[in-house]
Amino acid sequence: MRNSKLSSGVSRVTITMFTLLALFGSLSFLTSGSAHASARAIKPHHVIAHPISLPTSKVASGSGQTQFKCQLPNAPFRCYSPQQIATAYSYTDLYKAGITGKGTTIVIVDAFQSPTILADLKAFDATFGLPDPTFNQIAPLGLTPFNPADPNQVGWAGEITLDVEWAHAVAPGATIDLVLAPSNNDIDLYGVTKYAIDNSIGQVISQSFGEGETCVDPALLPLEHQNYVNAAAKGISVLASAGDQGATQPTCDGAPNSYFLSASSPASDPYVTAVGGTQLFAKASGTYQTELVWNESDLGGFSNIGGGGGYSTIYSKPSYQKGFVTGNARGVPDISYNAAVNGGVLVYQNGGFSLSGGTSAGSPQWAGIVALANQYHGKAIGFLNPLLYNVAKNSASKAYHDITVGNNSFFSFDGTVNITGYNAKKGWDAASGLGSPIVNGLVKRI
């Protein structure tokens, strides 16, 4: 059973057994022998997904529009509303034509739960003049009781809020299905993603989480890959965040302040669209000015933070990246989106607003773009990557902002970590992919 109203609670569907649907395709691994799952038990690994946020508050405004401190001139940290983002990335013409994602469903995959998400979404919509969506919460493997003393669960509640509010902000007419795993172990996230794909509950799936490729148990990796193969066969688009530590990922042992050069999984899977990070500069009206590769100081003071990207050590270069990516490995990200904290998006949670950043913000917004494209074309556009690269071949300047400034190197301020990443350049690069979207042009050309 699925709930169908914004005020609904969480429905529970119990899955007792998973079955793989080997619909088509074969695994494309760089390392020989990795394509076969072993018979041993899969060792779970925690997957990271915590957006980076700063509190902000409303200020008086004579314009009749709600305004926030971070929107004021010379604010130390800037922020954007849904209307500003719509202007910057050229959504408004589609909205005027009635393209809002109506008739489509966006699936948001997250872990644990947010006990305030229903009230938060309602307050967010009221503030920015958005309609309340059809919103369902689904817990296929059961729901973990929320523990406000657990920082891990609190972090995921913030992720849920960001994902739901901003997928909805981009596609205000789409249904939002929030699919919750009982934990952030990769095996649980795999399980609920499989449920969403096997049951075709939506046409686009967003995953704002990731881990180093080699941190995924070798027995689980081909199962995850088959999930995404199955999604493509069913016409489901799948997106994932590319990470927030530049060209690195936290080491697999979970040691504090320890990182290694790595692409992020599941973003690096060739059947997943990897979303990298930029820093957007727009006027108060939202008019686009420029973008750089996202790379700024960590608010905690240990290191910089920036858009994930690099080259897979597991997957070979897919055919759609030929002519774009040098070498033989799958390159990420495929595309990018604003991810900066200084220039973050406004999020309402548990009684207050904050500005949030990270590639966590990009994946749900790109899922919203896919929902707009699905409505515009009158069908699910499905496996996204070949379409994105084909558009880049034929009309890149009308569909993408090409990001040519910045890099995603990663370093600590105490000098203990210093990992060289990748520079932005003309065309595709491992810091910003094909670039950020010019939505009106991209949707029409996909």
Image (cartoon, rainbow, N blue to C red):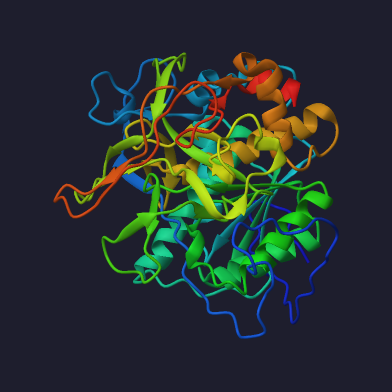
Seen at 67% across and 30% down, the residue is: 389
Please state the total of marks drawn on the protein image: 0
Is any atom of residue 120 visible in this view?
A: no
Horizontal side of 370 relative to 374 (left or right) equals left
- Front position in the image: 60 or 289: 289
Horizontal side of 1 relative to 431 (left or right) equals right
Asked if 349 appears above or below 380 in the picture, the reply is below
Horizontal side of 16 relative to 258 (left or right) equals right
Is any atom of residue 90 visible in this view?
A: yes
Quadrant in the rendering for residue 422? top left
Seen at 73% across and 26% down, the residue is: 99
Asked if 126 appears above or below 46 in the picture, the reply is above
Residue 323, percent from left and from top: 64, 29
Identity of the residue furthest to the left in this view: 414
* Quadrant housing the C terminus: top right
- Front position in the image: 165 or 21: 21
Quadrant in the rendering for residue 297? top left
- Front position in the image: 45 or 138: 45
* Quadrant housing the N terminus: bottom right
Seen at 52% across and 24% down, the residue is: 83
Seen at 53% across and 75% down, the residue is: 144
Residue 400, percent from left and from top: 58, 21
Residue 65, percent from left and from top: 44, 22
Residue 17, percent from left and from top: 76, 80
